[in-house]
Each structure stands twice: as C-alpha cells, then as structure tokens.
Amino acid sequence: MTLPTQVKIVEVGPRDGLQNEVAVPTAAKIALINQLSETGLSVIESASFVSPKWVPQMADSSEVMAQISRRAGITYSALTPNLKGYELARQVNTDEVAVFGAASEAFTQKNINCSIDESLQRFAPVLEQAKADGVSVRGYVSCVLGCPYQGDVPLADVVKVAKALYQMGCYEISLGDTIGVGTPLAAQKMLTAVAEHIPMANLALHFHNTYGQALANISACLPLGVSIIDSAVAGLGGCPYAKGASGNVASEDVVYMLQGMGIECGVDLTKLAAAGREICQHLGHGPRSQVALALQAKEDN
Amino acid sequence: MTLPTQVKIVEVGPRDGLQNEVAVPTAAKIALINQLSETGLSVIESASFVSPKWVPQMADSSEVMAQISRRAGITYSALTPNLKGYELARQVNTDEVAVFGAASEAFTQKNINCSIDESLQRFAPVLEQAKADGVSVRGYVSCVLGCPYQGDVPLADVVKVAKALYQMGCYEISLGDTIGVGTPLAAQKMLTAVAEHIPMANLALHFHNTYGQALANISACLPLGVSIIDSAVAGLGGCPYAKGASGNVASEDVVYMLQGMGIECGVDLTKLAAAGREICQHLGHGPRSQVALALQAKEDN
C-alpha cells in the first residue's frame, strides 16, 4: 500500500462533462478551456469528434479546438471514435486523441450496435494512423463497475478490453464507472485485476458520482498506487434532463482531497472553482462540487 | 486492517439535521421519525433540549418526543446540554441522552463562552443524574478535524476531550468533523489517536459533507475497525441560510456504500430515501443525497 506522491488530473469537463449537459455557446466552451489552462492542469480533454447527429453538444468541436488559447505544456485532447473523427481532430491540431470502448457487451450493442470485439476492430485504423503521425492515443473502458443494461460486468471482461486497448497501442487506459454504481471494495478489486496486466502508471480512474461514491472509490484506490484521475470541473456531466443527477466527480473535490492528503497535483483550487462557477452560468444549475459551494459560501459570508 | 462485518447507523437527521434547517412543523418531525422507525434503523436522535432562544428549530422537542410512535428495539435519543435539559428529556421518556463537547478551545469560547475544561464540568451533573437513573449518555466531540475559528485542532486536544467524556461515563464517543474540512489521511490519523485510549467499539464517526469528503473519510476509517457511523437522512443540516451548503453525510449514501461493501447495517434503502424525500418537502430544497437523487431519477424514467 503506497500512496502516490503526485497525481495527474485529466480534466474532462469540456468534453465528457459538456456533452452531457444542455448545449452551451462555443464562446463559453472556449472561455472555459482558456480559464482551465490557467489553473495548473496539464491535460484538458476539450472536444469530441463524433457525429453531431448523436452528440449535438459537441458539433462545434473544430471551432473550439481552433480558437482556444493554447498554453505550452498542456495537452489538449479530444475523443475520436473513428478515422474520420481523427482526421478532423488533427486538422485543428489536437495534441492527443482518445478512443472509447466498453467492458459491457450489452452496452456496446445498445450504444454502437456491435460486439465488443467488433468495436475494438473499429479503433484499429485510428491507432494505426496515430502511430504513423506520432500522436498519443488514450483508451477509455466504460462500464467497469456496472452497466445500465446488463447490471454486473465480469472483471474478466474489464481486463480483456483494457488489455486489448493497451496492446493495440493506447498508452493510457482510463477505467470508467460510467453509471457511478461502484463502491470502494469493488473499485479496488477491479483496479487490482487490471493492474495485473497493465502497469499501474498507465492506468487512470474515471469515476462518476451518481451515487455519491466517486471520491470514496478514488480514495480507496490511491493506496494501490494509481496516480491518474479523471474529473470534471463543477462536476459537469450527468444527464441534461435528470434534475440533480450527478456526472463526473468534481475536479474541485478531488483536488481538495489530494491537497489534504499531501499529494501534489499542481492545480490552483481557487482558479479551478472560478472556472466552474463561470461555465455553470450557462447551464441553469450551480456547480455540482461541494468544495465549490463551500468556497462560495465562505466568500458570501 | 479489518473491515467491520456490521455497522450501526446513528440517524441524526431529526436533530443535528433539522436544527440547521429552516423550522419545520412539529407534525412533519413526528412523521419523519415515525417513517425512520420503519426503515430498520436502531438509533434515532430525535430532539434537543436546549434553550429555544438559541435553537428555535428544536423548541418543540417535548411535543416531538411525547407524540412519536415508538417501535420496540429502537433507541430514541436527545441532546441535553445541562441538567434542566436532561430533566425535560426524561419527562417525555427519552431513551438515551447526549452531551456535546468540542476539541477546539476557540470554538468552545465562541459557542458557550467558557473553556473546554469548564464545559466538561458543566456536563458532570447530567452524567451523575443519568448514572443514577440508569440512562446511557453519548458524548460528542466536535471540531475533531478543524475549527471555524482556530483552524487546526491539535490531535492531543481531541484525545483529551474524548478521554474526559469517556472517563466521565459516556458509553460512546462520537467524533465530529463539524465543518467537514477533513480528508482521508487526517481522519485515519485522528481515529487512530483516539482509539489508543478508548476501545474502537465505543467510537463513532460523525462527519459532515461540506467539502464532499465525508464518505471518503468514512471509507478510509472502516478498515481501522470503526463500526458506528452518524448520518442524516437526505443529508439534512448544513446551514439554513447558505444555498447548497451541505450538512451531515447523507444516510442513504452511507447505507449504499456499506451494502456495496457487504457490510450489514440493517437499513432498507428505499424506505430511507422515501423518508428523506418527504421531509424535504418542508425545506425548500431536495435531498442532499446522491443516492436519493439517483433513485428518484430511476423512478422518473
């Protein structure tokens, strides 16, 4: 049991967050990413090059990537489900791309109408082209602690998909509790199983806070040595139509916890919370971050 | 490191929760406690016999205790800061009482205008009378992970107050992160220090979720063997005037986590969430429980 001394936060608010909120103006996205760039974050997932038919919230991804003010040392990444998306992403100088698999057969069928194996084959051209271009690819595995369609997801399936993506060339594998149903022991067990096949240094946790468990799950996994955490400023995400439904674990809450534990992540909490408050003005709800709310309440007093 | 197989939940919503919300009608409190009695909870802190000048929300404590429908096997407890409160509580058959100390010198001065040592002396008559009557007394220690006035609270002060209350006759010591600033390592360190002097079986965690850390802190402490958790249905509490400020950790979220970890607590989550939703109709805000919100969203779909 060794806590990491440093953790890399992968900020997914502008992508995984905003794709699950009501659509916001392009200028607001750009302002958000520019503000996040000033907080000390080193990776900002900024866009998604998917069909606007399926995800209209991300239809302006090319404009966003073209117009943000880039800061040296920050990786601005985007989701690219296929070669077409990859090419669009590269046209606007996306630094790093990501592909998105699921550990659940039922989820894969419902979501993209094919089997897990077929879905992996679809990524192959993206990984080949990225390799040729010298572009790093991140691999997501969703539904690692449960699936909205099939319920339980066998650990063996999580390991299989994570391993496949890693072997295909993804340098980092992000393990997603997409529906936020996991609890600490399950999270530890899952991470341990995957870490038998992929170095811990290449694994990230991507937990959603739907049932309030995300921070407890992250905290339970830190002593296993995991050092990459995905989170979204203001807890962006969830579902645009479910009142109060929580999305990604809030970056503010993760940063507060890490700082309290003496784990370095290089992020300025005050600036981060300010960025979260500003984007929320476009969303019709306040930050879904307890830290953001607590800091606000302190200021108001 | 041994996880407990069973955890006792001490439901503090009707007291610690509602005393920090806008006042609700007496009938609503009684309905809440009656509903909670049907969930499988074994301890419900139901009232507070403090001066109504200071805590007007609790002015109807005698009526509440007199009118609830008691269920065999459940302990209905109340806060009694002094002998007068104790006598009022006993007149309406309060099963168990509690006294409330703080580990912070500054907090004690600001809150009750005396030193920690003086505050402990004030509890002595309550403990003596309770002993003579064969009534169990719980001891709270607040500010165990931080204080709104002095900031850091030395571990030695937490240990001193916890030990004093235990030696004076409190059978159970509840360790309160009153302002919710703690993080997992600090929580573990604090619990470990206190457990060197008081058996772990007599220690409870009472964590607030102000900075979103409560569940992570509880989860971090469970492997140390702690088996009593204070929580409030719907996350009641916080501050009646601070928008979105979180109070006690939500009982629903704690129960969900424990069930996911295979730790028995005997509570029916569906009934618990229903009780939380009902009381929130009197509060002008929804449940501050992610589990409650997630269950509601599922029902609505």
Image (cartoon, coloured by chain):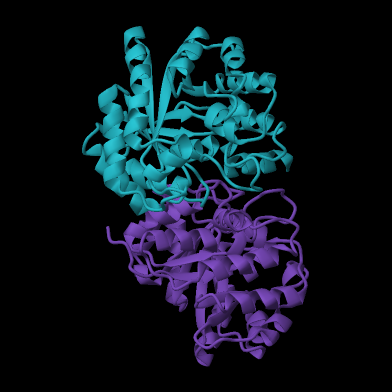
Chain colours: A purple, B cyan
Q: Residue A110: x percent and y percent?
A: 66, 57
Q: Residue A299: x percent and y percent?
A: 60, 58
A159 and B110: which one is in front?
A: B110
A82 and B292: which one is in front?
A: B292
In the visual, does A5 lie left or right of A258?
A: left
Q: Is residue B100 above or below residue B124?
A: below
Tell me where residue B53 sits by quadrant.
Answer: top right
Tell me where residue B299 sits by quadrant.
Answer: top right
x 49%, y 78%: residue: A42
Q: Residue B206: x percent and y percent?
A: 43, 37
Say if residue A20 shows up in the picture. yes
Q: Residue B200: x percent and y percent?
A: 27, 33
In the visual, does A16 lie left or right of B141?
A: right
If the image is split into quadrants, where does the C terminus of chain B sit?
Answer: top right
In the visual, does A267 lie left or right of B279?
A: left
B22 and B202: which one is in front?
A: B22
